Image: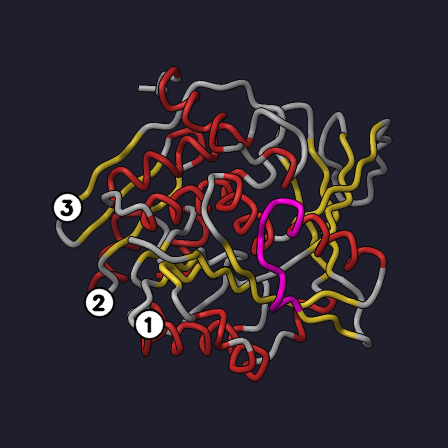
Amino acid sequence: MRGHILVVGSLNMDLVVRVPHHPLVGETVISNEYRRYPGGKGANQAVAAARLGCPVKMIGRVGRDAFGDELVQALSSNGVDTSYIYRDAHAPSGVAFIAVDEAGQNIIVVAGGANSLLTPQDIVDAQAAFDGAAVLLLQLECPLVSVEKAIHIARQRGIPVVLNPAPAQLLEMDLLEQVDYLIPNQSELAMLAGQDTIKAALQVLQSHGVRRLVVTLSEKGALVVDGDWQERLPTYRVPVVDTTAAGDAFVGAFAVALREGLSLHQATAWGNAGGALAVTRMGAMPSLPTRAEFDRFLAEARTTD
């Protein structure tokens, strides 16, 4: 499969602190480490794919501010085509406040800013970005109506749609039916299906026509579902430093594998490798592997099973 990956999604500046533990309600926790990284689910996934050697274009919105400048520059410096990143004169660029504890686990609060103003008309105005696309990659940090418009255009053009339904929210089943590859984590899966167990949630989604799912299971790897076929693929043994952007690294690597014509099984294995590499380093975008690092890791790493 040739062509580029088209990402429609968010760009946020990540403001990250290391903490000994996550604070309880009303508790103040002192941090001795603060850093700033370019991020946002859309931008992370775009850079994840670009660093793996794939041509990538992105549609999104940032403010006319210093963070916006830095976010666009971060994408450009990683090879992402930013021709369709809009600059908003009235809203600030999005930010994410992230606390990472000693086990590498994070809590995140996102203020969407300009991301929340990406409109369906913006998607229509950027239709040239769909020309020649091999995969459309989406998340949910931008308005749902804009996500729906992008899916509609992709379906008209026969472009496979990959949706990472994060942050978790309820979605109409007729929208999910139009998604070729749905990649939720366990909590997102539960939200989509209204069921607490993976088995029950899968039954609900499949009964509504959702055929291909990859459920990410953190340190347990990922569950691949294609109609009646299911398989759990283990993840890899790595030291955990920071889990921020692990899911984005997974999705980016998965999309690149699809673009290279690999099977759903192989694409999921690539996703597991991308996510595992990302947790070994601090930050979102800085943790995303290059193609050389990725290929070396696949050749040498051991899985957890």
Q: Answer left or right for 76 relative to 304.
A: right
Work out which quarter of the rendered image holds the C terminus and state it.
top left
Q: Answer left or right for 2 relative to 284.
A: left
Residue 28 covered by magenta stretch: no
* Label 2 close to label 1 by CB (< 8 Å): yes
Task: Give 242 or 10, whichever is nearer the viewer.
Answer: 10
Q: Which residue is mark 2?
A: 209
Task: Give 54 or 204, whichever is nearer the viewer.
Answer: 54
The earlier-in-sequence mark between 2 and 1 is 1
Q: Which residue is mark 3?
A: 229
Image quadrant in which you'd find residue 141: bottom right
Question: Magenta segment, which residues?
Answer: 76-85
Image quadrant in which you'd find residue 160: bottom left
Mark 2, secondary structure of its residue: loop
Residue at left offset 65%, top offset 35%: 286
Task: Give 263 or 272, whichever is nearer the viewer.
Answer: 263
Residue at left offset 54%, top offset 81%: 120
Mark 3, secondary structure of its residue: strand
Magenta stretch, main secondary structure, is strand
Q: Which residue is mark 1?
A: 173
97 up-or-down from 142: above or below:
above
Amino acid on which disc 1 is placed: Met
Residue 18: x, y in percent? 76, 30
Q: Answer left or right for 58 relative to 116.
A: left
Task: Give 229 or 249, whichever is nearer the viewer.
Answer: 249
